Amino acid sequence: MSQHHAPEDPQVLPLRPAGTNTTTPARNIYQRISAVQAEIGYIQKDRSVSTGGGSYKAVSHDTVTALLRPHLIKHGIVVTTSLSSDPVFDLAVEGSKQRLFRAEFFVIFINADNPDDRLTVTLPAHALDNGDKAPGKAISYATKYALLKTFLLETGEDEESRHQTGDYDFEEALSMAAQSNKEDARAIIAEARTMALKLKDAGAARDIAALSKVLAEKFKKLDKVGDDVAGQA
């Protein structure tokens, strides 16, 4: 007499993005990031950024996103960007329409199978604009650099020697100056002015002058606060 056995309950697996191998053990966020790093390593600078009298090569936010998106989906990584603190939107200084937007952002890399498993990168960003595009520019800047640095993507760009080749990133320099202390900001602004003169870049010179006024007012207020505190001591 034949015997019949009840079929075993099917194994329930966590949902995974399409195209992933469901037979492999669940991986944490660092293993997933490592897998993406193993698959890609170089991204070509795709656009020429004009600053008035000159230009420089750069890699755009859209290019970075387009390169990484299929790998993020394949390995189940979700990326989100959000403000980590209240942003500051300076008023335009006299003689310039440019306004400086400054903020700090969280760029979070989330394990799609376990949302509590995540890596958070915190970084500041700023943008100059004469309209309403500055916040969007800052968000894109923060997200792009978090992606480039987290996945160790090469751009073929030597940031340390860029000023020696004439391929000088004024936007990056002004961003650093806006986020630095007084002494460092002065040094960065001085170098940027020198490069603007060398490259005969009138647009960059105007942006440098506008930021210099903003920073001068900012540090003047900070110095006054310091003097008031010292007087009360």
Image: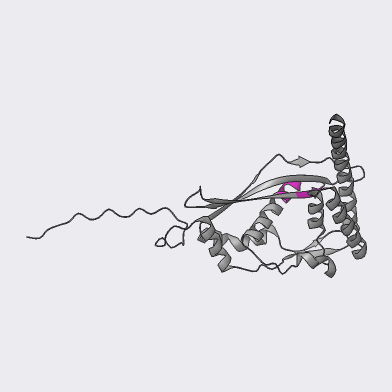
Up the image or down, 18 lies above or below 125; here it is: below
Question: Does residue 163 appear in this view?
Answer: yes
Is residue 83 found left or right of 29 in the rendered image? right
Tell me the residue at 64%/58% (across/down): 147
Residue 23 image position (x, y, % from top left): 39, 62
Please provide percent x and percent y for residue 55.
Answer: 83, 63
Q: Residue at x 59, y 68 (%)?
A: 40
Which residue appears farthest toward the left when viewing the image? 1
Q: For residue 191, what is the image quadrant?
A: bottom right
Q: Which stretch appears magenta? A: 126-138
Instruction: Identify the residue at image location x=84%, y=33%.
Output: 229
Q: Is residue 36 above or below residue 117?
A: below
Q: Residue at x 43, y 63 (%)?
A: 21
Farthest-out residue, top:
232
Residue 66 drawn at (x, y percent):
62, 61
**Quarter the N terminus occupies:** bottom left
